Image (cartoon, rainbow, N blue to C red):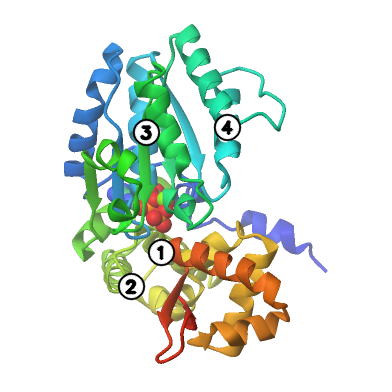
């Protein structure tokens, strides 16, 4: 039998370079985000001359370009000045206050003190390193809602950073990113104004904005004339209906192109988008699914229990399902409120029953 891989090698792909459609690709241009680009750049402008910029909060639904915008601006800032030091931290991966402080210290090129030392001392150490090195860290705290889980007090890190800045003289600022419109009211009063005075909103994309985003990608990812304009229009329309999410829309285009490729076609047409539309939307990850990887064992068990028993399950039923004694119930309650604060579940007090909640996984 002829070698299938040799045969395939000979076939010309519809893609010029698929990497431009990957979710982690950082675009140079962000169509539809000109206003946000200008606004954030105006806040950051002083940083190029060594002035500490204000802290900024970026708020918007999934796939609206917040993470990319923050990264793109810090990349451009680094091109014109070596003074600011961009540091990117995803709070779903670094969920503890101590973990984040450690990351900051190592990013600033110092050795992390051994565990067991009080966080307050670590903050002082951080400020000292900052002062000594004359660096100006600009810290992206992505998915910052994760830190607001009730009881955990991990959001103290926001206060730590403002204290390190104001009282201890660390020349740093924060770009915090969240999906949660309500985040400002959930913040501790000590950090609220410093973080929310410069809030930038990212609305869901319209069909025409999504089409412009796709057009820009198509130039790099495909050979000339490989994508029919109506196919792009359909992707954009589907993406806008499904939440104006650019991640999902780019994924749909990629999936449709794969389909065309499998069919041996040199052009991506409307029917390819039609053919993959349902599946592609179904497989688009919900915020929960994207974050699920970062949950700990107990949190995963709780989510699984809710999914198994069904939406609106009572807290009593969850304890039963997880087979916990009354001592451990407190721990579960604590996790539930963490998951609620992080926007992954919804809890409504059950009528007539004190402290019993109906719990659902957010879609
Ligand atoms: N205006 C845009 N132009 C080009 N690409 C974009 C634009 N907006 C978003 N994207 C792309 O869409 C995907 C999602 O964007 P991004 O990760 O920045 O969204 P987000 O707002 O941070 O979403 P989430 O809240 O889910 O983290 C990325 O692959 C990004 O490159
Ligand atoms: Mg993001």
State the residue at coordinates (54%, 89%): 310
**Residue 250 sits in which quadrant?**
bottom left
Query: Mark 3 vs ligand 2: CB under 8 Å?
Result: no
Task: Indicate the quadrant where residue 10 lies.
Answer: bottom right
Contact between labelled residues 3 and 2, with CB atoms less than 8 Å apart: no
Q: Report the Cα–Cα distance between label 4 and label 1.
A: 39 Å
Pick out the residue farthest to the right. 1
Residue wearing tag 3: 174
Residue situated in front as seen by the camera: 148 or 153:
153
Q: What SS does tag 3 mark? A: strand
Disc on the earlier residue, 4 or 1: 4
Q: Mark 4 vs mark 3: which is more N-terminal?
A: 4
Neighbour tally class for label 2: few under 14, some 14-19, many 20 plus, Cα within 10 Å: some
- Residue 98 vertical placement versus 284 (above, below): above
Task: Compare marks 4 and 2 and give the one earlier in the sequence.
Answer: 4
- Residue under circle 4? 119
Left/right of residue 125 with respect to residue 345 in the rendered view:
right
Q: Are marks 4 and 2 in contact (CB under 8 Å)?
A: no
Q: Position of residue 95 (x, y in %)?
A: 56, 47
Look at mark 1 in the image and give the residue it sits on: 248
Q: CA distance from mark 3 to mark 1?
A: 28 Å
Q: Secondary structure at mark 4?
A: helix
Residue indicated by mark 2: 242
**Residue drawn at (54%, 55%), measured in percent from left and top?**
12
Label 2 sits on a secondary structure element that is loop
Residue 228: % across, % down: 31, 65
Foreground label between 2 and 3: 3
C-alpha gap between disc 4 and disc 3? 19 Å
Is 357 rendered above or below residue 103? below
């Amino acid at each position: 039998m002829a070698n299938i891989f040799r045969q395939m090698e000979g076939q010309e792909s519809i893609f010029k370079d698929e990497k431009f459609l990957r979710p982690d690709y950082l675009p140079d241009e962000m169509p539809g985000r000109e206003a946000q680009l200008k606004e954030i750049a105006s806040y950051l402008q002083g940083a190029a001359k060594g002035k500490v910029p204000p802290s900024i909060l970026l708020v918007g639904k999934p796939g609206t370009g917040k993470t990319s915008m923050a990264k793109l601006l810090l990349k451009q800032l680094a091109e014109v000045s070596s003074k600011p030091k961009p540091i990117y931290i995803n709070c779903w991966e670094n969920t503890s206050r101590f973990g984040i402080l450690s990351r900051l210290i190592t990013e600033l090129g110092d050795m992390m003190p051994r565990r067991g030392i009080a966080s307050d001392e670590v903050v002082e150490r951080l400020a000292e390193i900052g002062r000594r090195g004359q660096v100006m860290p600009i810290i992206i705290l992505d998915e910052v809602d994760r830190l607001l889980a009730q009881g955990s007090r991990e959001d103290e890190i926001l206060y730590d950073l403002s204290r390190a800045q104001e009282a201890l003289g660390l020349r740093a600022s924060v770009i915090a990113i969240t999906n949660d419109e309500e985040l400002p009211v959930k913040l501790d009063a000590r950090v609220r104004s410093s973080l929310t005075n410069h809030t930038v909103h990212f609305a869901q994309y319209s069909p025409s904005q999504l089409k412009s985003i796709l057009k820009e990608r198509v130039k790099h990812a495909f050979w000339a004339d490989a994508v029919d304009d109506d196919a792009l229009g359909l992707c954009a329309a589907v993406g806008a209906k499904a939440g104006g999410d650019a991640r999902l829309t780019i994924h749909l285009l990629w999936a449709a192109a794969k389909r065309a490729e499998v069919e041996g076609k040199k052009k991506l047409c409307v029917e390819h988008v039609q053919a993959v539309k349902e599946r592609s939307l179904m497989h688009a990850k919900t915020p929960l699914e994207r974050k699920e990887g970062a949950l700990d064992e107990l949190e995963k068990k709780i989510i699984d229990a809710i999914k198994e028993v069904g939406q609106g399950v009572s807290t009593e039923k969850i304890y039963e399902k997880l087979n916990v004694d009354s001592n451990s119930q407190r721990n579960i309650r604590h996790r539930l409120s963490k998951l609620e604060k992080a926007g992954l579940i919804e809890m409504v007090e059950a009528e007539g029953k004190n402290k019993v909640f109906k719990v659902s996984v957010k879609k």
